[in-house]
Image: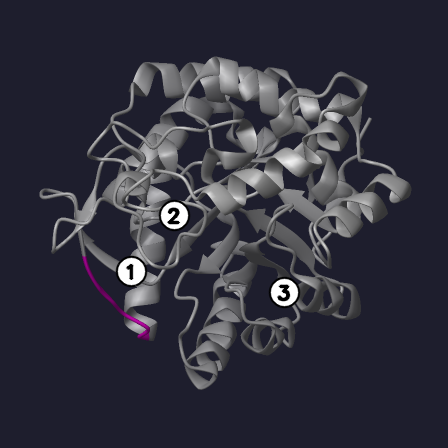
């Protein structure tokens, strides 16, 4: 059984598994028509899935203002309702979007926008505070990061947020935020196919929690073999930053071969492939909190079920590294 975590230096306790709310935002795109969501979604099923997750002990939910251009936050707020105080809510800011046309249309690193975005997120979430507020612009300049880190300290003093983080894959940028007293985490990509040793080392050194997006490699580590049929799914027209997928075949054969090579270890002890992928992350570092996405009660149950099985063993971790030659 995997035990609860404390979110960095904040004293905020979370379940060892969080739920990522990108997919439940539904369809949205950039101005050029590139899909940025995961296809169509059933809002009532999303709410049922969140309720099921709560029943199974999940207490951490990660969203962003831009997911579904506000829709994900609204659905999460609706689902939590009176149980808001029982959970830890993380959201993000930095992107500009149009809710009417469901399009992403820019970025804004200004202090004024950060305050406006936080106010709007609080309204959509139906709450008066955010537990973890995250800068969503992974490659913003470090000087901008330092200024926004100091602004987040103001938000903490005002009681609008409890802690903050940067969503970035760059350890140097994450280290800028880590200098702030109420920085609690960094959100970054981590899965069996994409290790992040430098970021995990930073989290250890700075006392931060490692919040892991893409823990199931956008579905590939959940056994998804075919490219999505839904034109509104980002994986149907994968951008350059999305590994494991290709326009022609839907999935990258080289990635699938690597996943197949470690499948037996990941599915040990009665785990599903997805549960094994989450177990690898927990074995990788006790500071990790993976946040797999979900769109159904069945996915919520499978992901939450990983907590009962706990992490892989150190020997299994070593064997996976040997097989993947790293």
Cα separation, mark 3 vs mark 1, equals 23 Å
Over which residues does the magenta segment extend?
105-110
Contact? badges 2 and 3 (CB < 8 Å): no
Marks 2 and 1, the one that precedes in the sequence: 2
Q: Can see residue 15?
A: no
In this view, the mark in front (2 or 3): 2
Residue 284, given in percent of the width and then of the height, sits at 77, 49
Of tags 3 and 1, the one toward the viewer is 1
Decide if residue 278 is on the left or right side of residue 45. Answer: right
Which of 29 and 243 lies nearest the eye of the viewer? 243
Residue 230 against residue 153 in the figure, above or below: above
Residue contact at pointers 2 and 1, CB within 8 angstroms: yes
Q: Which numbered disc flags the more N-terminal residue, 2 or 3?
A: 2
Look at the image and tell me whether residue 30 can be seen: yes
Label 1, on which residue? 95
The residue drawn where x is 53% and y is 21% is 300
- Residue 317 placed where, x, y %? 81, 45
Please name the residue that numbered disc 2 is placed on: 64
CA separation in Å, label 2 and label 1: 9 Å
Q: In this image, 178 relative to 22: left or right? A: right
The residue located at (61%, 43%) in the rendering is 258
Horizontal and vertical percent for residue 228?
31, 30
- Residue plotted at (33% across, 63% down): 94
Residue 68 image label: none
Neighbor class of circle 2 (other Cα within 10 Å; few <14, some 14-19, many 20+) is many
Is 50 inside the magenta-drawn segment? no
Label 3 sits on a secondary structure element that is loop
**Residue at mark 3:** 182
Q: Along the line of sight, which residue is nearer the eye, 307 or 113? A: 307
Q: Secondary structure at mark 1?
A: strand
Would you place residue 118 above or below residue 70 in this image?
below
């Amino acid at each position: 059984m995997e035990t609860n975590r404390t979110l960095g230096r904040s004293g905020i306790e979370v379940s060892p598994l969080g739920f990522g709310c990108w997919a439940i935002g539904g369809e949205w795109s950039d101005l050029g028509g590139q899909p940025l969501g995961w296809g169509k979604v059933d809002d009532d099923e999303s709410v049922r899935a969140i309720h099921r997750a709560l029943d199974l002990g999940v207490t951490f939910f990660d969203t962003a203002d831009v997911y579904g251009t506000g829709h994900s936050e609204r659905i999460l707020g609706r689902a939590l309702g009176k149980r808001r105080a029982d959970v830890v809510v993380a959201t993000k800011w930095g992107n500009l979007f149009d809710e009417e046309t469901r399009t992403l249309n820019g970025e804004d690193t200004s202090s004024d926008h950060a305050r406006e975005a936080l106010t709007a997120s609080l309204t959509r979430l139906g709450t008066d505070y955010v537990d973890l507020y995250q800068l969503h612009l992974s490659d913003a300049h470090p000087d901008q990061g330092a200024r926004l880190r100091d602004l987040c300290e103001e938000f903490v003093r005002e009681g609008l947020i409890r802690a903050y983080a940067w969503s970035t894959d760059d350890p140097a940028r994450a280290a800028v935020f880590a200098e702030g007293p109420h920085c609690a985490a960094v959100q970054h990509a981590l899965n069996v196919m994409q290790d992040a040793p430098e970021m995990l080392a930073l989290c250890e050194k700075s006392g931060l929690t490692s919040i892991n997006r893409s823990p199931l490699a956008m579905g590939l580590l959940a056994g998804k073999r075919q490219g999505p049929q839904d034109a509104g799914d980002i994986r149907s027209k994968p951008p350059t930053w999305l590994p494991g997928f290709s326009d022609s075949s839907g999935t990258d054969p080289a990635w699938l071969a690597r996943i197949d090579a470690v499948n037996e270890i990941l599915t040990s002890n009665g785990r599903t492939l997805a549960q094994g992928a989450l177990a690898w992350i927990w074995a990788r570092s006790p500071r990790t909190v993976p946040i797999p996405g979900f769109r159904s009660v069945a996915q919520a149950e499978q992901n939450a079920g990983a907590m009962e099985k706990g992490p892989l063993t150190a020997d299994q971790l070593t064997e996976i590294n040997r097989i993947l030659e790293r």
